[in-house]
Amino acid sequence: MIKRLNFMAHKNSGIDGLIAVEGWIAKSFDPKLLELVKVRVSQMNGCAHCLHMHRQDALKLGETDDRLLLLNAWRESQLFTTRERAALAWAEALTQIAKSHAPDDVYEEAHANFSDDELVALSMGVAMINAWNRLAIGFRLQHPADHKRAAA
């Protein structure tokens, strides 16, 4: 794999804008549920760096290994609440927007479980983790274990 630009070290107003939006989302939505969504979207997108980071953040907020392990199979697990299921379904629909077109039933379930403001914040959170995943994958931002392996 060829080394690519470290976009996080390349500070500019675009990156600063993304970070500012993240700050707003953090004040506007349940942080633990947001981390669960970020892990799920990062699984879908295959972003090793973001999976690592958001798994760690979720654990710090009290998330459990069992739930994180079963996140890819949340529909089959009884470990997730109705509210979490609505958030995960909405996150998946928005992440796969070209395929899903954000179905009405998924929207209705999300809207039934979240206030208007929460639904906007959740949707912005999904959009942001998709943006970060695309940047991290596109620029080949490495997982910490890859850094250790390369240094050895």
Image (cartoon, rainbow, N blue to C red):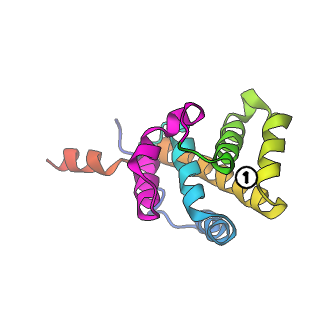
User: Which residue is located at x 66 percent, y 39 percent?
Assistant: 95
Position of the N terminus, as image quadrant, is top left
Residue located beneath label 1 in the image: 123
Residue 148: image location, x then y, percent: 22, 50
- Magenta region's main secondary structure? helix
Q: Which residues are magenta?
A: 49-78
On the picture, is 100 further left or further right than 42? right
**Does residue 35 lie above or below 105 as drawn?**
below
* Residue 93 visible here: yes
The amino acid at mark 1 is Ser
On the picture, is 59 further left or further right than 111? left
**Does residue 54 lie above or below 10 as drawn?**
above
Residue 48: image location, x then y, percent: 41, 43
On the picture, is 101 further left or further right than 71? right
User: Which residue is located at x 62 percent, y 68 percent?
Assistant: 26
Residue 11: image location, x then y, percent: 51, 67
Residue 94: image location, x then y, percent: 71, 41
The residue most toward the front is: 78
Question: In terms of secondary structure, where does tag 1 sit?
Answer: helix
